[in-house]
Image: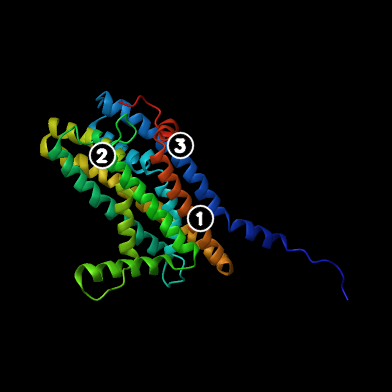
Amino acid sequence: MDDTVKTPAPSLMVSRWSSFVPYIVLAAAFILIAYYGTAVYNFFIPTVVQRRDFSLGIWLLAAVGGVAAFLSPCAFGMLPAYFGFFLAMDSSGREGSGARRALRYGFAAAAGMVTIAVVLAVVILIAGATFAPGLRVVTTTPNPYTRVLRIAAGVLLVVLGIFQWRGRSLGSSLRSGLGTLRQRAFTLKATSTSPTLLFYEYGLLYVLVALPCVANVMAAPMLAAIATQGIGGLIVTEAVFLLTMATLMVITSVLIGVANQTVLARMRQSLPSVLRAASVLLIIMGLTLIYLDLDLASFRRIFFHFPIR
């Protein structure tokens, strides 16, 4: 009888470690996004919004504004939380191409973002240049409605995380809850909500949370375009802004979807642990969002590296 101790083959050990590589890459990406996204925003507000410097060109600044809106300090917490949401929604073992499904989810979330952004653009045009600055929460007179909206979004993320932690499917819980609300509101038979629609609703939430930042980076090039280029320039400027935000969301979803598919293919037996990790991420990001809106001094100190007016 062979008494030698068997050790895992090197190739097996490498395979196990390699299964974590997509998550490590995503974590690094989130850190870089938080750093460089804040840098883009901190360039845009003092240079373009406060100094009215459009020397780079309105359309190019609209694209930069789209990046700043998507990666803004106001949206901090929503992108990592989106990863947890995606993981929880996409890990039920459904058949089909993971990449194709991720693309569909990305377009749905992007459509939700564009929906709110278009409504916001219309409101800015009607209300004028003073509307966007009035939504800010990091000034000496923070907008109470914006704070309540952001805190409510944080609570929602925590609730979603708790549902997932307790072993209840995030998708089915949301579908059940939405179905009940619809039944009460319309006295119709509750119908299931597709994951695609839930991603659309997450896109709505993403922009609502980032409303003060999105409104301010959108308003400057948009109002400058209509003043100097007329309606045609306004339409092109807004289209560039929206397309930039939407493209970033689609790219993010595809990258998360590919990483998710790779990891889960190797970690099916530990799927409950993976889903719990997703729930923890949702809860942490929700609590972070709530904390930053309760402690605005820390919010300003961490993310806003320019004079607040």
The mark closer to the camera, 1 or 3, is: 1
* Residue at (41, 71) in percent of width and height: 96
Name the residue type under label 2.
Answer: Ala
Residue 196 place in picture, x, y as percent: 32, 64
Please state, as top left, top right, bottom left or bottom right, where the C terminus lies in the image: top left
Q: Is residue 25 above or below residue 268?
A: above
- Give the mark toward the camera: 3 or 2: 2
Residue at image location 41% in from the left, 49% down from the top = 79
Residue wearing tag 1: 280
Q: Residue 242 versus residue 128: which sits nearer the camera?
A: 128
Q: How dense is the environment of label 2, judged by Cα within 10 Å: few (below 14), some, or many (20 and up)?
A: many
Q: Going from the N terminus, do you reach mark 1 or mark 3 first?
A: 3
Amino acid carrying mark 1 in the image: Val
On the image, the x and y values in percent for residue 200 come to 30, 58
32 up-or-down from 257: above or below: above
Give the SS element for disc 3: helix
Which residue lies under the disc numbered 3? 35
Where is mark 2, residue-wise?
215
